[in-house]
Image (cartoon, grey):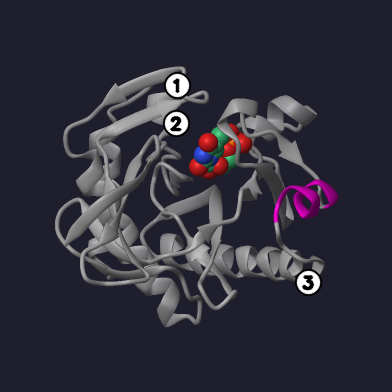
């Protein structure tokens, strides 16, 4: 199914899909990185867990009218997606304050954001993915003003749906990062992945962290908590 390797990122490899023009194979790696690649480790099984989790979430979003690049899961670590040109913006939605926003703006941990807070970061490893404003985003990408509004509205819709899905399995969606890509026809769809690498997920009862923060902070077993998220999603998808 895979042909030429097009791109290797920190968590995935991207291949052309053999005999399927306009489609790509995403291969999820076992590597975990944090702090812009400064902290690194490999966890056998992480690629499978994130592939399986992402492959459950995209169809759940689709059922609720949110299109993405996702086509199908191919095997344990790979999924087939529509080829897009990734827009170099990381769109973060926050429901509760934690992570960089608490350090950057002195906001107290766990402060609720109503409405949810959207932040844009420039996807550029050399610059350490800096926080940017809308005008920077328009300058640094090819999106139009109306498209940036669309992206932000879509991110809020994704937040509503993800919150509903995770609330149903006793998980609080604290915050998450989305990426969008442009299809051949010029339209913009949700791309990349949605997994415990890209979301902060807390057990709603105990507040135990069930996401990559256990690796970032060295406070828990990454494979165990990712498996816990998959097990809970299996009950509803
Ligand atoms: P932050 O609090 O570190 O800015 O992270 C906000 C959200 O974005 C959190 O859910 C983790 C996710 N995230 C990524 O997916 N990739 C990244 O490179 C970073 C820094 C955060």
Question: What residue span does the magenta drawing correspond to?
Answer: 135-141
- Residue 13 got which mark? none
Q: CA distance from mark 2 to mark 3?
A: 34 Å
Q: CA distance from mark 3 to mark 1?
A: 38 Å
Residue located at (42% from left, 53% from top): 171
Rendered-image quarter of ligand 1: top right
Query: Where, quadrant-wise, is the C terminus in this rendering?
Result: bottom left
Q: On the image, which quarter does residue 11 sit in?
A: top left
Relative depth, front residue between 159 and 147: 147
- Few, some or many C-alpha atoms within 10 Å of disc 2 (few <14, some 14-19, many ≥20)? many
Relative to 46, is 66 above or below? below
Relative to 70, is 35 above or below? above
Image position, residue 172 (x, y; %): 48, 51
Residue assigned mark 1: 217
Residue assigned mark 3: 146
Secondary structure under tag 2 reads helix
Image position, residue 84 (x, y; %): 48, 63
Kindly report the secondary structure that dominates the magenta region of the rendered protein.
helix
Residue assigned mark 2: 213
Q: CA distance from mark 1 to mark 2?
A: 6 Å
Secondary structure under tag 3 reads helix
Relative depth, front residue between 121 and 223: 121
């Amino acid at each position: 199914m895979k042909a030429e390797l097009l791109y290797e990122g920190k968590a995935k490899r991207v291949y052309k899909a053999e005999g399927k023009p306009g489609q790509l194979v995403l291969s999820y790696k076992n590597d975990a990185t944090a702090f812009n690649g400064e902290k690194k480790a490999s966890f056998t099984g992480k690629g499978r867990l994130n592939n399986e989790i992402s492959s459950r979430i995209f169809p759940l979003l689709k059922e609720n009218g949110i299109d993405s690049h996702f086509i199908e899961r191919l095997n344990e670590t790979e999924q087939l997606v529509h080829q897009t040109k990734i827009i170099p913006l990381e769109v973060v939605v926050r429901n509760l304050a934690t992570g960089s926003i608490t350090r950057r703006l002195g906001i107290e941990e766990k402060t609720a954001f109503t409405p949810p807070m959207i932040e844009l970061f420039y996807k550029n490893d050399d610059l350490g993915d800096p926080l940017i404003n809308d005008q920077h985003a328009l300058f640094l990408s090819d999106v139009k003003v109306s498209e940036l509004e669309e992206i932000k509205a879509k991110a809020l819709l994704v937040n509503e749906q993800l919150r509903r899905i995770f609330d149903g399995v006793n998980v609080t969606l604290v915050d998450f990062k989305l990426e969008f890509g442009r299809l051949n026809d010029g339209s913009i769809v949700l791309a990349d992945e949605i997994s415990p690498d890209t979301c902060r997920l807390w057990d709603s009862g105990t507040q135990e962290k069930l996401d990559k923060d256990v690796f970032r902070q060295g406070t828990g077993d990454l494979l165990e908590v990712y498996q816990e998220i998959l097990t809970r999603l299996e009950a509803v998808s």
